[in-house]
Image (cartoon, rainbow, N blue to C red):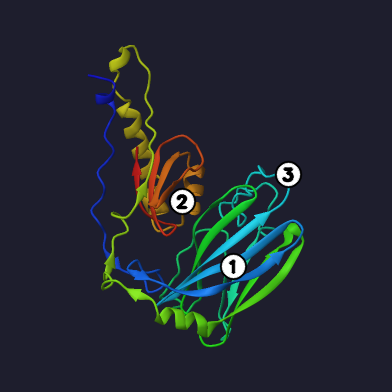
Amino acid sequence: MSFFDSIPQPPPRPEPVWRPRPVWMQPDEVIPGSVPGELMLIRTEQVAVVVSGIRAYPNGFEFTAHVRRRGNDVDEPGWHDPFDRHGRGRRQSSGEVLRLGLLYADGRRGATTGGHWRPDEAADPGRLVVQHGSSGGNGRRWDGNFWVHPLPPEGPVTFVASWPDYGVGETRAEVDGSAIRAAAAQAVSLWPEEPEIDPGGGGSWSSGTITAYKADESGPQAEPDFEARKAARERFEAAGGKAAVVGKTVEEAEAWCQGHGFLLVLVEQRGGASNLSWSPGRVRLTEDNGVVTDVHLG
């Protein structure tokens, strides 16, 4: 048996689990209408935060936050995400990171939370949802998209920002809610919306796996340590692992795995992959919008 023949194949994808599309979710089949202009929320000698590129959809709108920073400590851990969603910044505590929120004319409000969460439609169907989307940058530049649901009522939409770590208290800037609603009316639906989505398959996926072997005297054709893998699966099942992580946020699942001595080798998600902490054992999670939908043992 060759070396590559000895490597076990990854488990097959589970059968798709179909469910209704949440009303708060950004639609895939719509070309949004645009609202011109930019809002300067923060500008100091050290940092700047600007909101621009408002794109309106029938059920909400998206915008881009542009963050810039001066300074020599550009490689400081955690700054590459100024919102520190994964809690990895060394200087920043929850009260010091960049905060961004919105206030509607009718009093509804929402803000960045510093982590993944999934809105509960049944509990509060009218809740203002602010969700962090794709982002990227470096020590001096960061740009990220945010999704907001639902569309605002008539009146001002107030953007609120603060960054205590840089001595910036709450600052505000407004855009006309009527302009966002008018842009949403110009959005183009390319085809009928799919009535359901498949959180377990399709879309754009990126992942990586790590397979461990036990050295023995059989040389290059040594078989993987299947007994150890079986024991790990049994230990995971005995600890109630699947029930403990499915339906939880990625951060909650990571904390459970760490506390029970398991290693997260990868988290599969739409559009990318996350590398999480190491500990004994091998666990693969699948997530949708920050919530774990499935789990597999290596």
Q: Are marks 1 and 2 in contact (CB under 8 Å)?
A: no
Q: Dot 2: what SS?
A: helix
**Going from the N terminus, do you reach mark 3 or mark 1 first?**
1
Q: Are marks 3 and 1 in contact (CB under 8 Å)?
A: no
In this view, the mark in front (1 or 2):
1
Instruction: Look at label 2 and name its amino acid.
Output: Ala
Name above or below for residue 36 compared with residue 261.
below
**Residue assigned mark 1:** 51
Instruction: Look at label 1 and name its amino acid.
Output: Val
Residue at 60 percent of width and 57 percent of height = 83
Name above or below for residue 267 compared with residue 148.
above
Q: CA distance from mark 2 to mark 3?
A: 36 Å
Q: Nearer the viewer, residue 4 or 279?
A: 4
Q: Where is residue 112? Give x, y as percent.
A: 57, 65
Q: Dot 1: what SS?
A: strand
Q: Is residue 69 left or right of residue 204?
A: right
Q: Are marks 2 and 3 in contact (CB under 8 Å)?
A: no
Which disc is residue 253 wearing? Answer: 2
Residue at 49 percent of width and 79 percent of height = 180
Instruction: Look at label 3 and name its amino acid.
Output: Asn
Which disc is residue 72 wearing? Answer: 3
In this view, the mark in front (2 or 3):
3
